Amino acid sequence: MTPFKLTEELIAEIEQLIESKNNTALQSLLHEVHYADVAEIIDELNEDEATYLIKLLDSDKTSDVLTELDEDVREAILNNLSAKEIAEELDELDTDDAADIVAELPKEIVQEVISEIEDKEHAKDIVDLLRYNENSAGGLMAKELVKVNANWNVLTCVKEMRAQAENVTRVHSIYVVDDDDKLIGRLSLKDLLTTSTTSPIRNIYIPKVDSVHVNENPEEVAKIMSKYDLEAIPVVDEIGRLVGRITIDDIVDVIKEEAEKDYQLAAGISQDVEADDSIWELTRARLPWLILGLFGGAGAAVIMSRFEDLFSQHAVLFLFTPLIAAMAGNVGVQSSAIIVQGLANNDLKGSISNRLIKEILLALLNGVILAAILLLFTWAWKGDFTTSLAISVSLISVIVVAGFIGTFTPLFLDKRGIDPAIATGPFITTSNDIFGILIYFYIAKLILGI
C-alpha cells in the first residue's frame, strides 16, 4: 500500500471538482482514500468546501472522518448540517465517538439530533454515556461489547455472540456476567470452540479479569492497560455491573493528550492551546509564566544589587553570573524531569527521603566534577586561585540546591494533587535562578572575606 501524501496539487484538484460540482469524479477520487486521510484533506479546505464534501460522501466514511477532524473544523461543519444529517453520521459511529460529538453540539439541538437517530437502542446508549464526566472511564468507554451469561450453555452462547458481534467493530474479549449483569470473568475462545455445546459457561469461564470503575481517572486506566498489555478493558459501575469497555485506540488518545499537556506545562504554557488558536488565547496561555520569569529576573537583580561591594573588588564574579544561573536552571529541570517521568510511569520506588538523598548525592558528584573543570579554567584564565575557588565552591552548592529543589518540588506537587509536570518549566527554572544567584554571591563573599 502506497502511503498517502497530501499535496497542493491534490487540494487544488479537489477544490476545482467541488467548484464545478463534479460529484462523480470526487467520489471516484476519494473512494479508496482512508477516512483519516480524507480528514487531512478537509482540514485544508474552507468551511463551505468541507461541508460539501461531508454531504457528498457516504455516512459510513464521513462519520469516521468527523472523529478525526480538528474540533474547530468539526464544529463549523456540524453547524452547517441539519439535525437529521448529524443523526445519520452518529448512526454509523460507535457510541463513545457519537457521544463525544453530541457533547460538542449546541444544547438547543441535542434533543432533536437524538430523536432523529434511527437505531433507538444506539440513541439510548449515547444518552447513557453523556451522563458520565468526560474525564472519567465512563466518559471514555463505548457500550459496544460481547458478553455472555454464566448460566448459558455453549450453543446458546455462540448464538448470542453472533447477534451481539454485528454491532461490534472488533471483538477483543468475551465477558462473562451473572444474572444481575455483574462482571464475573472472561471467556477463552479456544475453550469455547473445544467444549461440548451442552456444557454451561460457568464451567469453562476464567474468573480472573481486569476491570476499571466508571469514575476512574483516564490516566489511571492508561497505566493499567499499559502495565498488563491490554487491548481493551471492561468498565463496571458502583455495584459491579458491566456497563462498557475501553479500547486501546481511546487510550492512545489519552496518552497523546496528556503528553501534549505536560509538554506545554514544561514549556510554560498554562492552558491547552494549539498553533492555530487566536493571538488572545495564545497570549493568555503564555503570559502568566512570562510574568513569573519577569519577577524572577527582577528578584535576581535586587539580590545582585546587595553585593555591589563584592562586584567592585572582584568584577570577575559578574562574568560568571549567567553560568551559575544557567547551571542552576539546567540541573533543576533535569532532576524534575526524571521525577515527573517516574511519577507518570509509576516507576518511583522507595521513600521520598531516599529519593532526595540519591538526587543530592548525584548533584554533588556532578557538581564536584564541573567545579573542578571550572576551577582549572578560571585559574588559568585569571590567575587568581582564591576567586576561582570561590566560584567553583559556589557552583557545587548551587548544583546541590538545584537538584534538591528539582526533586522535591514535583514530589510535593504530586502529593498535593497538582500536576507535577508544572515543575519542569519556568517555575523550577526561575526559582533555581534566584536561589542560585543568592547562594553564589553569599558563598563567594564568605570565601573572599568581604
Image (spheres, grey):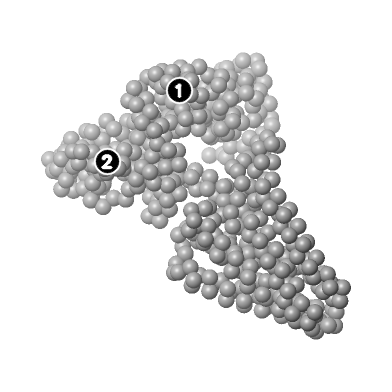
Q: Position of residue 19 (x, y in %)?
A: 66, 17
Front in this rendered view, residue 110 or 84: 110
Q: Residue furthest bottom?
A: 385
Q: Residue at x 60, y 43 (%)?
A: 271
Q: Is residue 404 shown left or right of residue 152?
A: right
Q: Residue at x 67, y 78 (%)?
A: 369
Q: Amino acid at mark 2?
A: Arg
Q: Secondary structure at mark 1?
A: helix
Q: Is residue 105 shown left or right of residue 142?
A: right
Q: Residue furthest left?
A: 198
Q: Secondary structure at mark 2?
A: loop
Q: Residue at x 46, y 27 (%)?
A: 102
Q: Residue furthest top?
A: 21
Q: Residue at x 73, y 53 (%)?
A: 294
Q: Is residue 358 shown left or right of residue 281?
A: left
Splitting the image into 4 quarters, where does residue 443 fall? Answer: bottom right
State the quadrant of the C terminus: bottom right
Q: Position of residue 239 (x, y in %)?
A: 26, 43
Q: Give residue 241's mark.
A: 2
Q: Which residue is mark 1?
A: 110
Spatial CA distance of label 2 from label 1 is: 28 Å
Q: Position of residue 87 (x, y in %)?
A: 44, 21
Q: Amino acid at mark 1?
A: Val
Dot 2 crowding, Cα within 10 Å, few <14, some 14–19, many 20+: some
Is there a contact, CB below 8 Å, between mark 2 and mark 1?
no
